[in-house]
Amino acid sequence: MQISANKVVSIEYTLTNDQGQVLDTSKGREPMAYLQGHRNIIPGLESALEGKSAGDRVQVTIAPEQAYGERNDALRQAVPRTMFEDADQVTVGMQFQTMTEQGAQVVTVTAVDAEHVTVDANHPLAGETLNFDVTVVDVREASDEEREHGHVHGPGGHQH
């Protein structure tokens, strides 16, 4: 069975940056499962996997615009320390979830000084060229419920 829209795809993968540093891998875990055509994974990887079958290996380099986008300086801002309940505990690298007009947004603390905490709402991999080494483990039809919900249920997918 080939990967196409509304198929549940299970993959094993290793993600590296242009310096060869491993950023993420499924090694030692269950294969990752996603629903093809429902934006469950980055567009460039979803496109590269279209038409592949179980057992196929795909090595692909994905530019930022087909991954997490370019970095957007407008998504960085300095906010008063008083906005944080335990401001003395806030350190660089911490992540917080905040509500925006677009819904929940994760921000990363990039700087802390006496007056402000600088946060960045860019995805941590924004602006990065990503290199995937993927093996397709399984391809199956999605259930009606998975298609309705827009994601995979069960091992490697979403649990309700």
Image (tube, grey):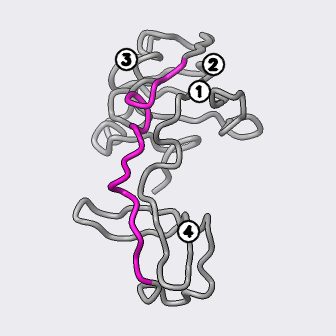
What amino acid does circle 4 point to?
A: Ala
- Is 98 placed above or below 37 here? below
Quick one: which residue is furthest to the right in this view?
Answer: 28
The residue that mark 2 highlights is 135
Residue 148 in the figure: left or right of residue 41: left
Q: Secondary structure at mark 4?
A: strand
Give the crowd class for mark 1: few <14, some 14-19, many >=20 residues within 10 Å: many
The residues bearing labels 2 and 3 have C-alpha atoms spaced at a distance of 16 Å
Q: Which residue is mark 1?
A: 11
Disc with the residue nearer the chain's start (4 vs 3): 3
Q: Amino acid at mark 3?
A: Ser
**First-in-chain label (2 vs 3):** 3
Q: Residue at x 40, y 19 (%)?
A: 47
Query: Along the line of sight, which residue is nearer the eye, 145 or 58?
Result: 58
CA separation in Å, label 4 and label 2: 39 Å
Q: Alpha-carbon distance for marks 1 and 3?
A: 14 Å
Judge depth for marks 4 and 2 and give the one in front: 4
In the picture of the structure, the residue carrying the numbered disc 3 is 4
First in sequence, mark 2 or 1: give its number.
Answer: 1
Q: From the image, tell me which residue sits under label 4.
A: 111
**Callout 1: SS:** strand
Task: Give me the disc on residue 44.
Answer: none
* Mark 1 residue type: Ile
Give the distance between the C-alpha atoms of the residues marked 2 and 1, in whole angstroms: 6 Å
Residue drawn where x is 55% and y is 28% of the image:
130
Which residues are the magenta region? 61-80
Q: Earlier in the sequence, mark 1 or mark 3?
A: 3
Asked if disc 1 and disc 4 are in contact, CB closer than 8 Å, the reply is no
